[in-house]
Amino acid sequence: MNHHALVPLGLVLVTGFLVPWLVVRARWAQQVPRLALAVWAACGAVFTTATALLPAQLVLTSESSHRLTDMVLTLRLPTPERLFALEGRELLAFAIVLTVVSLPGVAFLRRLALARRVRLRHAGVLRLVGRYDPDLRATVLDDDRPAVYCLPGRSRRVVVSSGAVHTLTPAQLAAALAHERAHIAGRHHLLVAAAESFSAVFPRLPLARHGGTSVPLLLEMTADDRALRRCTRDALATALYALASGRAPRSAFAAGGPSAALRMRRILTPYSAGHPVLRGLFTITSAALAMTPLIIACCSFPG
């Protein structure tokens, strides 16, 4: 086997199996959700690239394989003239890379298009049955069940049930609205679509399995943290408790939901911000260092 294939193979194992196993068991991931989201996103990008490069390295000659390794590690993209000059094994390798990389990309675009159609349809219903409240800057629906959710994307809006308006105190309602606006401002629907499409392409992979369940929860926690800039912990926690049984339509983010109890406990037990960050960076650094000797060895021997 071409020894240059060991680098993408190692990256596949580290990002697809090792790092997800470490992150899903780490306490720091829920304490610093933005860092954990960055780890999941980086693992997805590196795994996809490595998965595309692995079969390409296997079909290339040793000399071409070494050039490809150097090009990837130095982040040097081939020129258009170089791409048009490809032939034989190099052309086959390029076709393999393009095909593998396009699979999650196409799935992501399809997922976005489907979610957008669902949101537009629901937004049309809201225009008919809801009423806009300028004080809340939200659409109010007549429903006795307390619920607060948002529709992200181009049809973005925050929706509040009349039950939530009557049940929540002004401080709790403001906290719930701040949570939903954090989802919209952070474009969290894009990360959800990316996680879902990645899981659809690689359904049995630990990275896809764990990431598919972890990413939505981490996004809720990220929105909680952003909402806490504008409200108190008690207001947000009690709002989550009141909205825990609330439901939201498909492709929408709800302030309550099944994760409310876990998020309430997290909100009411603040932590020291420095230690979780250091533990997270230690996990990332350890995984990177595990690959360093292999990368150095493969770059040192062209044949």
Image (spheres, helix red, strand yellow):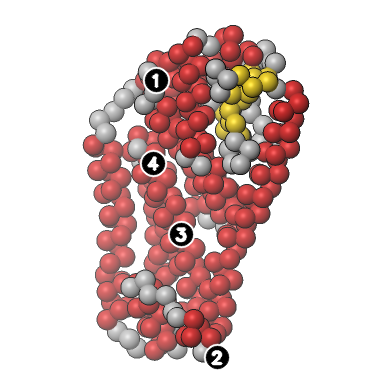
Q: In this figure, what is the number of numbered marks? A: 4
Relative image position of residue 135 (x, y in whole percent)? 55, 17
Q: Which residue is mark 3?
A: 45
Task: Measuring from the top left, give residue 100's x and y in whole percent.
Answer: 56, 68
The quadrant of the rendering that contains the N terminus is bottom left
Q: Residue at x 32, y 57 (%)?
A: 287
Image position, residue 241 (x, y; %):
50, 17
Q: Taking the image as drawn, is residue 259 in sight?
A: no
* Camera-side residue of 154 and 103: 154
Compare marks 4 and 1 and give the one earlier in the sequence: 4
Which label's residue is closer to the chain start, 1 or 3?
3
From the viewer's perspective, tell me whether residue 253 is left or right of residue 238: right
Q: For the point 26% across and 70% down, which residue is it?
A: 293
Depth order, front residue of 118/2: 118
User: Secondary structure under badge 1?
Assistant: loop
Q: CA distance from mark 1 to mark 2?
A: 62 Å
The one of 20 and 142 positioned closer to us in this rendering: 142
Q: Amino acid at mark 1?
A: Cys
The kind of residue tagged 2 is: Gly
The alpha-carbon separation of the residues under discs 2 and 4 comes to 44 Å
Residue ID for mark 4: 34
Q: Tell me if residue 46 comes above or below residue 227 in the rendering.
A: below
Label 3 to label 2, Cα distance in Å? 28 Å
The secondary element bearing badge 4 is classed as: helix
Sequence-wise, which precedes: disc 3 or disc 4?
4
Instruction: Tell whether label 2 touches label 1 (CB within 8 Å).
Output: no
Q: Tell me the number on the disc at residue 88.
A: 2
At horizontal 42% and vertical 35% (from top left) the residue drawn is 222
